[in-house]
Image (cartoon, rainbow, N blue to C red):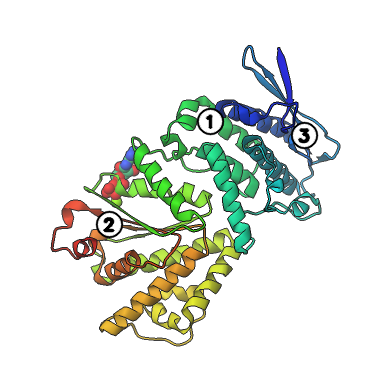
């Protein structure tokens, strides 16, 4: 008994969302393989939609086969003729189809038009892959966040990640890579789809294998907090990670970097070194320098948005801050030089205020900003003062601040202990 369904939900057909995640992954794998076959035959499909994918399920032996139909718009892949763009467009369509299969709605038909279908369907010479979260308007990126939440509420993180990477169009270069990711999932569905650990030990194509053992609880706790913070009205939260040296504090927190970035957030880290007392603030300065570099590499719109937000909220106070965080000069024009003065109470308050404004401006421009300050037991006084400024800032939104320290090296007289009390 074979049951034939088109993958689009309609009255007579079976909605794939009724199946379990494993069956879904199997279907997704078959579809990716099908598209890889088409591409390997030197052709791009150019019209991959849910209607054009026929899924055959044999309920007796559980076998699944799929057929991709309607090659009416297919074209031969020629190197000079935007071959990579055409492949990317098919992959992007694949992402949209998988989204629809999983969630049950076409992302374009959800009430907010997010990905700009007109743009997407037009097949001019330039790539017209929709880009998530770079539209610049709050309304749009919020809808993106809604789509992500919707998907994440239905699919395991690893599957949501693959689908969003496809929709964003900048992770996968070929359908074979997608095929490989779903294949990997199917080699151990219990691990990849059903245990919480798997949600984060993502073994995605092209990314480093980085699986933490026995940290399921901590990882889902951190990600739950991240999800709270990254909600539209998300308030800021502080997480402290303490333990002996070598306990795995850094590894644990670093492990949320990929999922955070996958879901639109930014993860930055400042690590204090034992012998850096000589160079106060270097961890924080480096952290921001890395942030600017990262932003420039990833996404120009977000960069410009953040730059504008910083300039607007700090104005002439930028001078004060740039004397403490010189890397600010890399992104904003600062003409007047000021000598660092962190001595007097007034100067300290000013520094606290401007630093808060900086972090607020960045965090508010993103779904969420994660700041990880590692090895706080070695932080200098000014850095600790800035850390404290953030902890006590009640007006900052969308910030997840994570601090780690060696418990046994922070006794009652340690300046960090005073802050944490
Ligand atoms: N849960 C884990 N599974 C596998 N390796 C781990 C785990 N936690 C830590 N490690 C490894 O143990 C070593 C020490 O961890 P690290 O995070 O640097 O400790 P800490 O920051 O607490 O001093 C690192 O090489 C790290 O990769
Ligand atoms: Mg460490």
The residue drawn where x is 37% and y is 37% is 216
Residue named by callout 3: 51
The residue drawn where x is 61% and y is 64% is 301
Residue named by callout 1: 184
Q: Secondary structure at mark 3?
A: helix
Residue named by callout 2: 375
The answer to whether residue 310 is left or right of residue 178 is: left
Query: Which quadrant holds the C terminus?
Result: bottom left
Residue at the limit of the structure toward the front, as seen here: 11
Name the image quarter holding residue 419: bottom left
Which one is nearer the viewer's eye here, 264 or 303? Answer: 264
Return the disc, 3 or 1, that comes first in the chain's sequence: 3
Characterize the local packing of mark 1: few (<14), some (14-19) or many (20 or more) Cα atoms within 10 angstroms. Answer: some
Residue contact at pointers 2 and 3, CB within 8 angstroms: no
Q: CA distance from mark 1 to mark 2?
A: 35 Å
Label 2 within 8 A of ligand 2 by Cβ: yes
Return the disc, 1 or 2, that comes first in the chain's sequence: 1
Label 1 within 8 A of ligand 1 by Cβ: no
Residue contact at pointers 3 and 1, CB within 8 angstroms: no
Residue 293 place in picture, x, y as percent: 50, 64
Q: CA distance from mark 2 to mark 3?
A: 54 Å
Name the image quarter holding residue 24: top right
Residue 168 place in picture, x, y as percent: 63, 49
The residue drawn where x is 69% and y is 34% is 36
Query: Which quadrant holds the N terminus?
Result: top right
Return the disc, 2 or 3, that comes first in the chain's sequence: 3
Which one is in front in this view, the residue at disc 3 or the one at disc 1? Answer: 3
Q: Secondary structure at mark 1?
A: helix
Characterize the local packing of mark 3: few (<14), some (14-19) or many (20 or more) Cα atoms within 10 angstroms. Answer: some
- Can the viewer see residue 335? yes
Which one is nearer the viewer's eye here, 273 or 153? Answer: 153
């Amino acid at each position: 008994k074979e049951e034939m369904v088109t993958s689009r939900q309609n009255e007579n057909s079976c909605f794939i969302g009724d199946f379990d995640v494993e069956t879904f992954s199997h279907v997704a794998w078959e579809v990716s393989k099908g598209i890889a076959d088409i591409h390997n035959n030197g052709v791009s499909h150019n019209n991959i939609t849910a209607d054009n994918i026929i899924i055959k399920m044999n309920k007796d032996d559980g076998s699944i086969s799929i057929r991709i139909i309607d090659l009416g718009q297919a074209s031969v892949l020629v190197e000079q003729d935007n071959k990579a763009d055409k492949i990317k467009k098919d992959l992007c369509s694949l992402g949209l189809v998988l989204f629809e299969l999983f969630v049950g709605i076409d992302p374009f038909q959800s009430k907010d038009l997010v990905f700009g279908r007109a743009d997407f369907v037009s097949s001019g010479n330039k790539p017209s892959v929709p880009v998530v979260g770079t539209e610049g308007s709050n309304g749009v990126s919020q809808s993106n966040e809604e789509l992500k939440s919707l998907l994440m509420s239905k699919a395991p993180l690893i599957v949501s990640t693959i689908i969003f990477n496809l929709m964003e169009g900048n992770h996968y270069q070929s359908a074979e890579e997608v095929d490989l990711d779903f294949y990997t999932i199917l080699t151990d569905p219990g691990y990849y789809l059903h245990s919480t650990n798997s949600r984060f030990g993502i073994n995605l194509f092209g990314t480093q294998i980085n699986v933490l053992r026995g940290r399921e609880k901590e990882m889902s706790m951190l990600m739950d907090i991240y999800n709270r913070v990254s909600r539209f009205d998300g308030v800021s939260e502080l997480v402290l990670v303490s333990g002996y040296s070598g306990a795995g504090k850094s590894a644990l927190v670093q492990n949320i970097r990929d999922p955070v970035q996958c879901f639109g957030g930014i993860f930055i880290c400042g690590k204090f070194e034992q012998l850096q007392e000589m160079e106060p603030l270097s961890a924080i300065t480096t952290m921001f320098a890395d942030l600017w570099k990262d932003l420039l590499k990833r996404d120009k719109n977000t960069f410009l948005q953040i730059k504008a937000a910083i300039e607007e909220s700090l104005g002439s106070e930028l001078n004060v801050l740039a004397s403490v965080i010189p890397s600010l000069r890399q992104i904003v024009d600062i003409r007047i030089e000021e000598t660092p003065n962190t001595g007097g109470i007034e100067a300290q308050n000013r520094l606290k205020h401007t630093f808060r404004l900086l972090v607020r401006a960045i965090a508010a421009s993103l779904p969420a900003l994660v700041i990880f300050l590692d090895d706080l037991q070695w932080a200098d006084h000014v850095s600790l003062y800035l850390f404290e400024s953030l902890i006590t800032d009640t007006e900052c939104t969308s910030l997840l601040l994570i601090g780690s320290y060696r418990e046994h090296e922070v006794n009652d007289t340690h300046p960090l202990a005073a802050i944490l009390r």
